[in-house]
Amino acid sequence: MGELLPVFDLKQVTQQFDRLLALDRITLQIYPGERVALVGSSGAGKSTLLQLLNGTASPTQGEVWAMGHNLNHLSVKQLRQVQRQIGTIYQQFHLVNNLQVIHNVNAGHLGRWSFGKAALSLLYPFDRQSAAKALHRVGIPEKLYERTDRLSGGQQQRVAIARVLVQNPTVILADEPVSSLDPELSREVMDLLRDLVQESGKTLVVSLHSVELARSHCDRMIGLRHGQIFFDAPTHQVSDRMIAELYHS
Ligand SMILES: Nc1ncnc2c1ncn2[C@@H]1O[C@H](COP(=O)(O)OP(=O)(O)OP(=O)(O)O)[C@@H](O)[C@H]1O
Ligand SMILES: [Mg+2]
C-alpha cells in the first residue's frame, strides 16, 4: 500500500464560508480502485468535499493533492490537465436538454477538443462510434439521436454516465447521482456505476443519501458530520449504531 500513489491526498483541509465551517480539518487518502461512499446529513459537507476533489473549489486552509499534484499550486492549464482525469456526475445530470443525446455524450471530449472542433461537432457529430459504444454500455443504444429532454430521469442519468465514459477519466466523482430516481432505478444506475469502475479499475467517490446503497455498492464509507470525519472505515465495519450516531444531530 505504501508504494501506491493515492488518487487523492487531503491534508488538514478546511473550507470556511463566512463563519460557517463546511469542512473542518479533513485528512484522508483515497487509493486507486477504491469505491468510497460519502454519507452524512444534509449540510454535513459532502458536496463541498467533492468540489475540492475535482478542483472546482479551493480550500480555505490545508492541501488537496490529486494524482500527485497539489491542486492549489497549478496553473489553469495544468489544473485542466488533471481535471481531464476526473469525471463528475451530478444529481441534476447537467445535460443540455434541447440537444440530441449524441452531443451530450460527446461533451465528454470537451477537455481534449479545441473549441472549434467542439462547436463544429454540433453540426456534424464527430466520433459517433465512441458515443454509440458508450450509450450501448449504459443500456440505451437506441437513444443516440433522441432529444435529451425526451428521455426519462433514469435515461438522462445514463447519458450523463455515458458522457463520463467518453471522457474516460481515472476517477469518477458522483454527487448524489441517484437521488432524483426511484429506488429500482437508483439501484440499476448504481449497479452500472459500480460495474464500470470495477471493470476498468477506476476509482469512485460517491455521495449518497441512501446508506443502504452505500453499503451494497462501496467498499469504504466516510461518514461526515458537521464538516468533520465522524468515521472512515471499510463498509463491513460500519455498524448500524455508527450510522444512527452519524445522523443524530
Ligand atoms: N458556496 C457556499 N457558500 C456558503 N455556504 C455554503 C456554500 N456551499 C455550501 N455551503 C454550506 O456548507 C455546508 C455544507 O454544504 P454541502 O453542500 O457540502 O452539504 P451536503 O453534505 O452536500 O448536503 P446535502 O446532503 O444537502 O447535499 C452547508 O451548511 C452549506 O450551507
Ligand atoms: Mg450535497
Image (tube, rainbow, N blue to C red):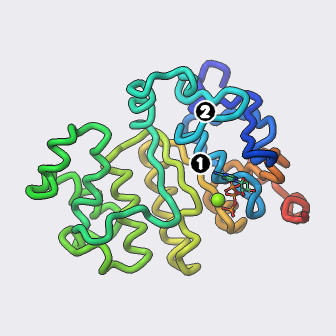
**Front in this rendered view, residue 143 or 79:** 79
| Mark 1 crowdedness (10 Å alpha carbons): few <14, some 14-19, many ≥20 | many
**Disc 1 and disc 2 in contact, CB within 8 angstroms:** yes
Provide the secondary structure element on which disc 1 rests. Answer: strand
Question: Image quadrant of ligand 2?
Answer: bottom right
Say whether residue 189 is left or right of residue 210: left
First reached walking from the N terminus: tag 1 or tag 2: 2
Say whether residue 36 is left or right of residue 96: right
* Kind of residue indicated by mark 2: Phe
**Front in this rendered view, residue 61 or 124:** 61
- Location of residue 68 with respect to 237 vertically, above or below: above
Q: Position of residue 72 (x, y in %)?
A: 57, 25
Q: Residue at x 68, y 31 (%)?
A: 10
Q: Residue at x 64, y 36 (%)?
A: 30
Say whether residue 158 is left or right of residue 125: right
Provide the secondary structure element on which disc 2 rests. Answer: strand
Q: Residue at x 39, y 29 (%)?
A: 81
Q: Is mark 2 within 8 Å of ligand 1?
A: no
* Kind of residue indicated by mark 1: Val
Residue 205's label in the rendered image is 1
Q: Position of residue 1 (x, y in %)?
A: 66, 25
How far apart in space, not on screen, are marks 1 and 2 (Cα)? 10 Å
Residue behind mark 2: 8
Q: Quadrant of residue 4?
A: top right
